[in-house]
Image: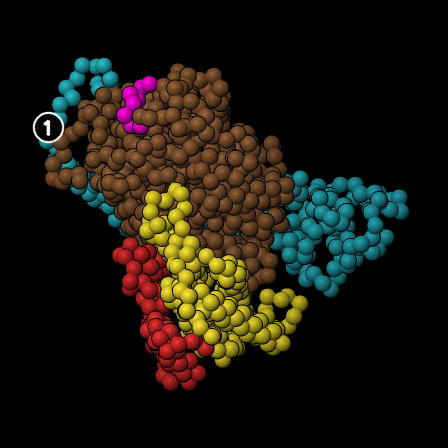
Chain colours: A yellow, B red, C brown, D cyan
Amino acid sequence: MSMGAAETPVGVKLVSHFATVEQQKRAAVLGMWAWLLTELLLFAGLFLTALILRLLHPEAVQEAARHLKFWIGATNTVVLIGSSLTMSGAIQLSRLGWPRGMVRFMLATAALGTLFLGLKGYEYYADYQEHMMPFLGDRPYELKDSPPSRLFVNLYYVATSLHGLHLMTGITILLVMTWQASRPGFLAAHQNRIEIFGLYWHFIDLIWILAFPILYVLNR
Amino acid sequence: MFGTDDERRILWRHMREPVLTAGALLAMLGINVALGATLPFPHVWIVELLVASAMVVTILLFSMEVRHEPPLVKLFAGIGFFWVGILFTMTLVDYLSRS
Amino acid sequence: MSSGTITDGPALRDPHTPDSRLGHDADYLHAEHTLRSWFFTTDHKRIALLYLASITAFFVIGAVTAGLVRLALVVPDGQVFTNDTYNKLFTIHGVVMVWFFLIPSIPATFGNFLIPLMIGARDLAFPKLNLASWYVFMTGALFTLASVILGGVDTGWTFYTPLSTAFSNTWVVPALIGVTIVGFSSILTGLNFVVTIHTMRAPGMTWFRLPIFVWTHYATSLIFLLATPVITVALILLIAERAFHIGVFDPAYGGDPVLFQHLFWFYSHPAVYIMVLPGMGVISEIVPAFAQKKLFGYKFVAYAAIGLASVTFFVWGHHMFVNGQSDFASVAFSVLSFAVAVPSAVKVYNWTATIHKGSLKLDTPMLYAMGYIGLFVLGGLTGLYLATLAINQHVHATYFVVAHFHYIMVGGTVLAFLGGLHFWWPKITGRMYIEAWGRISAFLIFIGFNVTFFPQFILGYLGMPRRYHVYPPEFQFLNILSSAGSTILAVGYIFPMVYLVYSIWFGKRAPANPWDAKGLEWTVPSPPPAHNFLTEPVAPKVPYDYPLQARETGRQHS
Amino acid sequence: MNPTDLALQLWPPAASSTAVETDWLILAFTVLTLLLTVPVFVAITWFAIRYRQGEEADRSHGNVRSVLIEISWMLIPFLLTLIFFVWGARLFFISKQVPGDAMVVEAIGRQWMWKFQHPTGQSEINDLHLPIGQPIKIRMISQDVIHNLYFPVFRMQMATLPDRYTEMWFKADRTGTYRLYCSEYCGTDHSKMDGTLTLMTQADYAAWLQNSGAQQGGQAGAGRVVYESYGCGACHDPGAKVRAPSLAGLYGSEVKLADGRTVTADETYLRDKILNPNRQKLAADYKQVMPAFRNVIPPDDLDRLVAYLKSSGATAQQEAKP
């Protein structure tokens, strides 16, 4: 079937308080970057905590890190890199004015994001089975001989669940936008929404690119 | 799944950069995973950290297209990392000099 | 709206003509009348008023608890309240004043109202986001308020671990959740300002034509963006610590309580500049207007704002000299803290130089501004005392610190807030207040403030620790003096609330520019039209283009 | 316990050379502060009068070398204040370098009391007796939250952390009675976590260590720790969930028993009640819920606990918790 036979017009509709479309687009891009700044510092606080834990209790942190599901983490990184690729595809097609292909790429992105969450959920489940959830007070803890290891494992849950929350938000917005984009006229009025959302999605990816080595790899 | 050759060519022209970016990211991830799985030498974390940094820069410059953006956006993309640097450095000044 | 008949732009009109002929259904206050038009407005001016109403309410709550704290300290043996009640009272005072009054005070009201007007924009870049941030603010604030008032929290506004996580039996988690939510409101406001100042300036409005008020708000917004997320994550960890005992701050598992202090002060020290910088912006508008003289050293003052916002991120450790931080870190943080004096000095000396050979009108806003300069100087320099390691070892966590930060926050932020309120009141409401009352209140607040807080410097040096309900009897005299001063201060606060509200209905109608001030906000009618500018705003060639100016050589404004 | 009878004090006493130098530092800093600010205040006031609107005044402006002015008023105050950074840092380092011959006193902070232990083994609660002319190092830790041991008379304080030892040192050079505080907010009775510091000559200190009265005080103080550690307060403190008789002022009072007799609460009674409360000594109007502590509490702890109950401290402590 044909994707681009009828290229739809691409553009951004001017909102009244802006003078020009150019200004409106610049404001949107800058706004998203400003938001991403705050996201970076948010996770930086967690990464700093991980580093301090490593400095205070090197052996315990190493032991805890060896109990994380390294291969699931690695697979999930591959999944997210893939989702970044499909998101880039959606952005490219939005610029070309090929809405149907774009929608497919967006759905693929959401699907990969969901796959990530599914794998993450499975990882949590496996952790639960292996008694690696020290914050559950009434459940025995695998590494109970090394109390400081609890801290790192718990921090891992805080960091990954916060990242998961961001991903879940991303998927929700993406699905809503996919639904909007599947109706005619979207690209003519709101093409830059795809680009702005793309920045967010890539950045969540970037955070994971940092979180994976910091949590799983560096401390082994 | 894409219709005409023409369309495929346009598509590839636009997708080449994202695909190459993803390929580079996967390659770097491969290095890190291999290093993490085998731990070939002590202080391998330095290399792992460098590879992770390279991945971050790749995402910023290529996936997020910062290199095509005006200087202001480049500044905003960089300033956050600078501030993370302040946070880490000044906190480590305390922790590394504790007796 | 019936604004179609206006032919001449406001910039062309004589600024002293009351604009009653414009018809008052054209201005933003009278454009629509329904409740819905207020609570779902996206007009930055109306949102500013929503903020003004809410932070005034929070200020009253904070002030009442402060009054109760001062009441308790009249007697040394703690007979007025139980220790728990006293601890809850000062926690309410701290939490409400810091997070629900001081931080949003000037940015969310005057910043919201004035930034688009000053840069010649229709609105902020993201009007809906602006409204959303008010709702986020109210949600978080009411949530916290409910928990600190209904249940009570006794950790102090600093929430130090392990007291807040493992030992306090009060409603800490709900209070923390509320404060975390309020943080998002700060972030959204900061984001909106940064984007607006970058992208929404009128044609010709270059950076060096912007009023200092806009510069300082830009600097403030950067702090909002760069510091707030760190306290958010610190509070999230604290909540998780309390709810799930994750242990990162809990020494029982090998966690480090000092790490919380690092994360906390990484935000909370810059937060001082979130409170102070906008105040400096207000003063930089008032002083030239009432001296009718160009602001001295404009570029230095502008750069000083950005400088302060950056340097402030390097000094947080001076809160932790005696808290188990390494000695080397203490020395590093101490010397960096002294660097803050540089941009602060720039501001003060430039305001003084602006007054030199001016043509001064000592109206209410100017009185507040002069009071501000005096108190800020005292507060700032005692800050240097605290940054000095040996002095800090003595007065850390004593009343010296309490006096110091009240000179900065009340003397600085609150006086600037009130000065700004009087300065822009005619613009915001279209009415003049009674000048004599304004002057009386300015004097009362200045005197009341000094009587309240100067004795606390002495108390601190004598060694009275802060947050003490029961204290040694030899401190009673100074404490009574301080409490007596707080009653004068309270009267000083009540005055403006009365005569300003009175003026809304009975005040004289205000002309577009009652103070002969420069700046785009004074070229539009009072109150401004719903769409800000009736004609395309024309950026001035030079900022602060007052009749008097020193010929500054060595650089030029462009 | 009244270190000063002055109704209005304006300057705190100093009892070490470091404290005196800190005073000089802050005085000199204040002089500099005045030099920097008084001109500003005078200028603002003078300008406000001189250049008021309508006043005849010379408002002409010559050329101002503003960059030079700006840089000078940025840098000169900064460099002047740096002197005080250096001075402050010097004193700070002195206060961190503990002399080798320092006498080590252990301090433990807990909600809401200080426990001090002398090198010879005697311990004190909240109050501290120390000799002058001898470097003293305080090694401290907290058992719960962060506290902060503060001696205004030495111009010195240091946090006690739950997870590691911190220390401070000083050399007192003046006898007298002064105050000590907890200066880091630590919960309900933070403001009652204070005490007195008594500085005495070395001979007096030696005598004090020998003095049985002081020992007794130490004994009673240690008893309070026992009282806390066995959780006695959970039932016996006023306002506790379990309604048990208040122990405030119990010692020496007449107790009505459930069987109608009245006995005097002497030391034997106290010991018996703790070790085996289930004998026929149940106080009137109370149910028998208290567990027996025979074979639970070691004899020395029992001695301390009884000493605490006998001391006026127990009375004050009980009444202080309304």
Q: x, y percentage for residue C435?
A: 39, 17
The quadrant where residue C65 appears: top right
Residue C319 in view? no
Where A194 falls versus C377 (above or below)? Answer: below
Tell which of C27 and C119 is nearer to you. C27
Disc 1 chain ID: D
Secondary structure at numbered mark 1:
loop
The quadrant where residue C116 appears: top left
Left or right: residue D32 versus residue C196 is: left
x 46%, y 26%: residue: C25
Q: Which residues are magenta?
A: C9-17
The quadrant where residue C524 appears: top left
Tell which of B74 and C97 is nearer to you. B74
Residue A166 among those drawn in magenta: no
Residue A103 in view? yes
Left or right: residue D67 versus residue D262 is: left
Tell which of C390 and C300 is nearer to you. C300
Q: x, y percentage for residue B55?
A: 36, 72
- Which residue is outermost to the front? A6
Q: x, y percentage for residue D169?
A: 39, 53
x 38%, y 59%: residue: A10
Mark 1 lies on residue: D62
Crowding around mark 1 (Cα neighbors within 10 Å: few <14, some 14 to 19, many 20+) is few
The residue type indicated by label 1 comes to Gly
| Prevalent SS, magenta region | loop
Q: Count how many numbered circles sit on residues in the image.
A: 1
x 29%, y 59%: residue: B69
